[in-house]
Image (tube, rainbow, N blue to C red):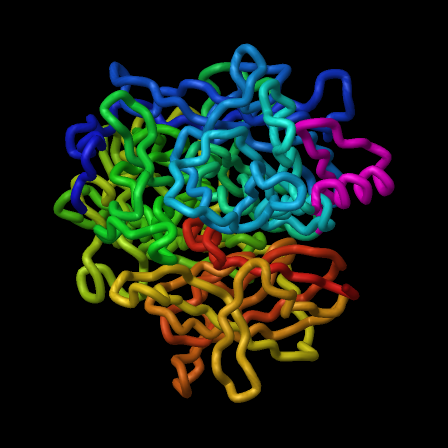
């Protein structure tokens, strides 16, 4: 993978020079109910590169009453099944004088996006320009989505419910909130009695369902790729309920509020992201379409190709829990890792080896045992040699270091491609990531055992009873489509769109602003046939529900094959492979306006996202 001009050479960055950061627990509001939080987004400096290197300016979540908590990824919100949580999400992207900050990264104002300069009449639209504009530099909107949750529309983090900071210097003609913000604010206050103030939204999470690994991130229309890349993400762990383990003991403890410094943890959430850095430590993200495929224009008005947006971007450096290539010192015992693929577009294939360049495999004793996916525990534990994760997918795994002597060094590597994943096997169907850079993730160093391991061997665990969804009353067919330029057909993808099919079976690509076509009844259970007509594997996410994968089938009439063993629990994100039908069973339990989209963030930011309306219009 070539290094772009101005980007720090990843091969020159020292590896395994800093410890893996284990996210602390987000503190609740002082003097308030323990399940009430104020969580803000701020700009700050963070040491992502190795010690001695420059710090990086990032955006991240934290508690305003605890300034030390601001970090990317954020402190973890710990929640309990069926115990409601209130979060006041505050946009504090302002400078020391209270004036709004510009974005850290280049914003393409020619997309269909939040568009605050358009005012109330022009917000959430694709503005018209007579010449190619530069990046937008105005106040930055945000709205937070709890990914994998099961909540009402007002607390979904809908892409058009964004809000600007309560800042000085915002022009009077700018829209300060998105098209649905005021409607959702009124509904939320009527139901919960808590008003929303300027520059904030108050979301209520009922936390129904099963214990699982959720996460939160920004979801602003046309800006998600940039706000997440800038650092806006964090874990939300849901515990307890009827879906907790009944027979056996999992590795622990996990971090808790009030833990003393130096406490050892054996349950660790890890978000893996790819980023690029400039020599001064700042984040690099492309500022021109030319950095994707060499197309240097014409843009506006000479073509329909966006001047800044890139169809995908793959960082040159791997970052885990906010640090480049960290080291985790482990003991000879079992660990529970909650992995999240937090990359914008990169798919990961994780495995453990003794040599990260030669990919010399680790001994068979170091197996991966997957307990859960996005929707909680699987029906049974699955032993895996590697773990494939699409962007936004999670894997709850146990890794056993028991048989390794003190001093052993092992490496978590990534064999996913330095490009869009299309399915298949590394080395056979595609080239694996660069073994010297993006192919390496974390080093494990085995140290002495400090306390006895009382956890149950994973093969002996009995997971909670799994209740599958009932029969479906309808099958709905949707399409994934790549759209070329209408003026410059030789230029690669202009957009990737979701859509439907017409009466003759011809795909109908649709944009975000087209009329709603997915309108299931509240309480309905449907089979969605996701027909991928593109050459990419797209991670498809449906908001506020957990679904089950039914099967897959090559287009037009291949043999149906069942889901993989690790896909047989509940999920909220699924790979739709190229030229295949992926079938999922979905139960729509709550009415409201939600979304479904591809979770390659560059795709969703340029129209690969559709509104989902459950219940009557």
Instruction: Point out the stretch of residues depicted in magenta.
Output: 180-208
Q: Nearer the viewer, residue 326 or 43?
A: 43
Percent coordinates x, y for residue 609 in the rendering? 53, 58
Q: Nearer the viewer, residue 305 or 320?
A: 305
**Residue 255 position by quadrant:** top right
**Residue 229 position by quadrant:** top left
Q: Is residue 145 left or right of residue 396?
A: right
Percent coordinates x, y for residue 512 in the rendering? 56, 58
Q: Indicate yes or no whether the magenta region holds residue 185.
A: yes
Q: Is residue 385 left or right of residue 144?
A: left
Measured along the vertical axis of the image, is residue 379 above or below residue 440? below
Identify which residue is drawn at 65% across, 33% down. 176
Percent coordinates x, y for residue 405 in the rendering? 25, 34
Please say whether residue 401 is visible from this viewpoint.
yes
Q: Nearer the viewer, residue 270 or 53?
A: 53
Identify which residue is drawn at 74% across, 56% down. 592
Q: Quadrant of the C terminus?
A: bottom right
Please say whether residue 242 is visible from this viewpoint.
no
Identify which residue is drawn at 41% across, 87% down. 557
Identify which residue is drawn at 39% across, 85% down. 558
Q: Indicate yes or no whether the magenta region holds residue 204.
A: yes
């Amino acid at each position: 993978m070539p290094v772009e001009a101005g980007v720090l050479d990843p091969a020159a960055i020292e590896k395994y020079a800093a410890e893996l950061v284990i996210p602390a627990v987000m503190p609740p509001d002082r003097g308030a109910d323990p399940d009430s939080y104020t969580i803000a987004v701020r700009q700050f400096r963070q040491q992502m590169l190795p010690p001695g290197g420059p710090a990086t300016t990032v955006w991240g979540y934290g508690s305003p009453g605890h300034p030390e908590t601001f970090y990317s990824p954020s402190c973890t919100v710990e929640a309990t099944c069926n115990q409601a949580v209130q979060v006041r999400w505050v946009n504090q992207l302002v400078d020391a004088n209270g004036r709004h900050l510009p974005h850290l990264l280049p914003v393409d104002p020619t997309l269909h996006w939040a568009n605050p300069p358009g005012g109330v009449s022009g917000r959430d639209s694709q503005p018209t320009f007579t010449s190619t504009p530069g990046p937008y530099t105005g106040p930055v909107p945000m709205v937070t989505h709890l990914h994998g949750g099961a909540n009402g529309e007002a607390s979904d983090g809908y892409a058009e419910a964004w809000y600007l900071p309560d800042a000085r210097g915002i022009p009077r003609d700018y829209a300060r909130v998105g098209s649905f913000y005021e409607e959702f604010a009124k509904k939320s206050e009527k139901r919960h009695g808590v008003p929303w103030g300027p520059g904030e939204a108050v979301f209520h999470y009922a936390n129904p369902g099963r214990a699982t690994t959720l996460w939160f991130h920004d979801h602003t229309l046309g800006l998600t790729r940039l706000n997440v890349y800038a650092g806006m993400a964090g874990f939300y762990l849901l515990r307890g309920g009827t879906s907790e383990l009944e027979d056996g003991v999992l590795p622990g403890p996990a971090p808790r509020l009030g833990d003393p410094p130096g406490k050892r943890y054996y349950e660790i959430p890890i978000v893996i992201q790819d980023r690029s850095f400039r020599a001064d430590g700042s984040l690099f993200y492309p500022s021109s379409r030319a950095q994707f495929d060499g197309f240097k224009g014409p843009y506006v008005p000479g073509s329909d190709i966006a001047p800044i947006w890139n169809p995908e971007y793959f960082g040159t450096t791997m970052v885990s829990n906010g640090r480049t290539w960290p080291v985790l010192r482990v003991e000879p015992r079992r660990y529970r890792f909650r992995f999240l693929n937090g990359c914008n577009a990169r798919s990961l294939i994780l495995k453990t080896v003794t040599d990260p360049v030669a990919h010399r495999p680790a001994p068979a004793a170091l197996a991966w045992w997957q307990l859960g996916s996005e929707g909680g525990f699987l029906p049974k534990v699955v032993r895996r040699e590697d773990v494939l994760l699409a962007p936004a997918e999670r894997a709850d795994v146990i890794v056993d270091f028991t048989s390794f002597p003190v001093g052993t060094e092992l490496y978590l590597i990534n064999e996913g491609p330095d490009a869009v994943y299309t399915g298949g096997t590394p080395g056979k169907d595609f080239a694996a990531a660069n073994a010297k850079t993006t192919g390496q993730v974390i080093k494990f160093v085995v140290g002495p055992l400090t306390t006895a391991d009382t956890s149950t061997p994973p093969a002996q665990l009995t997971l909670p009873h799994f209740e599958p969804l009932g029969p479906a009353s309808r099958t709905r067919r949707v399409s994934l489509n790549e759209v070329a330029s209408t003026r410059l057909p030789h230029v690669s993808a202009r957009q990737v769109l979701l859509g439907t099919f017409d009466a003759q079976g011809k795909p109908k690509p649709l944009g975000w602003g087209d009329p709603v076509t997915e309108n299931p009844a509240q309480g309905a259970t449907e089979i969605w046939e996701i027909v991928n007509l593109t050459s990419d594997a797209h991670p498809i996410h449906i908001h506020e529900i957990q679904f089950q994968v039914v099967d897959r089938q090559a287009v037009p009439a291949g043999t149906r094959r069942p889901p993989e063993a690790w896909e047989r629990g509940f999920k909220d994100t699924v790979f739709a492979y190229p030229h295949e039908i992926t079938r999922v069973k979905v139960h729509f339990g709550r009415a409201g306006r939600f979304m479904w989209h591809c979770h390659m963030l560059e795709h969703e930011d340029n129209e690969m996202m559709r509104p989902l309306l459950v219940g009557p219009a």
